[in-house]
């Protein structure tokens, strides 16, 4: 049985006692966890599990899953909630897709989730590395499930979409099947963008989702963090916006402050509130819904929810 520990809070004045009892993380350390760790290190990959200080790392890595973070470990933006390092990346690693394949093969993954830092310095925003990863993964294993969690490609949305679509056209197998889940997280309600996602634009995020959602073989996905000061009414408005954009998959989770330099948590929502949001999301027509305190966009992403929808 795995040990259960409270999530570590890095605040200047440690306040783990103020964390509600439902905020728990599992510690990894078993054989599978160690193998995941070794595979990530051996292939020189970054994971959002580590870089974002995800509270689910013990559980996910012990299940032999991880979310690979492409395009380096340095993000060109500085969102106030995010633990990923910020700066001006001075390199570009076009060998990453091959190493993602090697790691996925070693881990026996049937469903691979790939995300990346923002690379506003690149002409295609880094879409080429997503596309090459898709090609390489499908060449290795034609039936493998692939989910992208991409940036908004703010300055180059059309180009980035074209780059990914070109790869998709090369690797698509069964017409009508879901070939790619394309996730992009709106993260929070528009009124909080200036403090939470400075440098991003709610409408730009919606635009990306609206453009990819109707494309054949693609399902669009998004996620919202709660507990940053948003109201229920604002969250419902975002869910409605996502549905109007054609988004079919949504996840909602509690924001946790990664360090004292990040935005403080305004409120811990109860599991009952998360259940309520899940119910609302299903009523709005989302057909893949995950909502819970420790839910993250890649958490159990491989689980199919049709025909019976589960949270
Ligand atoms: S929820 Fe996603 S980011 Fe977090 S540990 Fe699991 S796979 Fe990694």
Image (tube, grey):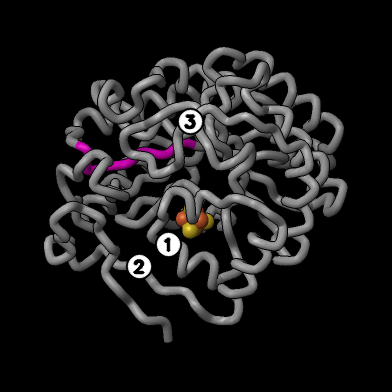
User: In the rendered view, does 294 fall on the left or right side of 40?
Assistant: left
Q: Residue at x 53, y 37 (%)?
A: 74
- Residue 226 location (% of width, % of height): 27, 42
Q: Nearer the viewer, residue 62 or 251?
A: 62
Say if 6 sits above or below 280 in the image.
below
Mark 2 lies on a secondary structure that is strand
Pointer 3 residue Cβ closer than 8 Å to ligand 1: no
Q: CA–CA distance between discs 1 and 3? A: 26 Å
Instruction: Determine the image quadrant of residue 237.
Output: top left
Say if 282 sits above or below 189 in the image.
below
Please give the residue where the numbered disc 1 appears in the rendered image.
56
Q: CA–CA distance between discs 3 and 2? A: 29 Å
Name the disc covering residue 289, or none: none
Please give the residue where the numbered disc 3 appears in the rendered image.
87
Pointer 1 residue Cβ closer than 8 Å to ligand 1: yes
Q: Which residues are magenta?
A: 222-228
The residue positioned farthest toward the front in the image shown? 90
Look at the image and tell me whether residue 299 can be seen: no
Q: Residue at x 26, y 26 (%)?
A: 195
Disc 2: CA contacts within 10 A as few (<14), some (14-19) or many (>=20): some
The residue positioned farthest toward the bottom in the image shown? 1
Pointer 3 or 2: first along the chain? 2
Disc 3: CA contacts within 10 A as few (<14), some (14-19) or many (>=20): few
């Amino acid at each position: 049985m795995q040990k259960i520990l409270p999530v570590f809070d890095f605040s200047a004045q440690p306040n783990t006692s103020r964390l509600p009892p439902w905020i728990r993380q599992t510690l990894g350390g078993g054989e599978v966890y160690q193998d995941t760790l070794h595979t990530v290190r051996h292939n020189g990959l970054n994971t959002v599990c580590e870089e974002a200080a995800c509270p689910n790392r013990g559980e996910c890595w012990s299940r032999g899953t991880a979310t690979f973070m492409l395009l380096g470990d340095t993000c060109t933006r500085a969102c106030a909630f995010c633990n990923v390092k910020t700066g001006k990346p001075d390199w570009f690693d076009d060998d990453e897709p091959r190493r993602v394949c090697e790691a996925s093969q070693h881990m026996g993954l049937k469903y691979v989730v790939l995300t990346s830092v923002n690379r506003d310095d690149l002409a295609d925003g880094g879409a080429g590395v997503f596309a090459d990863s898709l090609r390489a993964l499908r060449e290795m294993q034609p039936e493998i499930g692939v989910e992208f969690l991409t940036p908004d490609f703010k300055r180059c949305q059309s180009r980035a979409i074209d780059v990914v679509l070109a790869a998709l056209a090369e690797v698509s197998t069964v017409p009508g099947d879901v070939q790619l889940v394309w996730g992009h997280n709106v993260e929070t309600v528009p009124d909080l963008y200036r403090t939470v996602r400075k440098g991003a634009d709610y409408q730009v995020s919606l635009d990306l989702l609206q453009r990819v959602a109707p494309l054949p073989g693609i399902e669009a996905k998004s996620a919202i963090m709660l507990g940053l000061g948003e109201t229920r009414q604002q969250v419902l408005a975002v869910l409605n916006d996502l549905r109007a954009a054609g988004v079919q998959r949504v996840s909602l989770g509690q924001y946790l402050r990664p360090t004292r330099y990040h935005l403080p948590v305004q409120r811990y929502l109860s599991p009952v509130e998360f259940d309520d949001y899940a119910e609302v999301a299903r009523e709005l027509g989302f057909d893949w819904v995950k909502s819970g305190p420790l839910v993250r966009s890649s958490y159990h992403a491989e689980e199919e929810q049709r025909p019976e929808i589960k949270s």
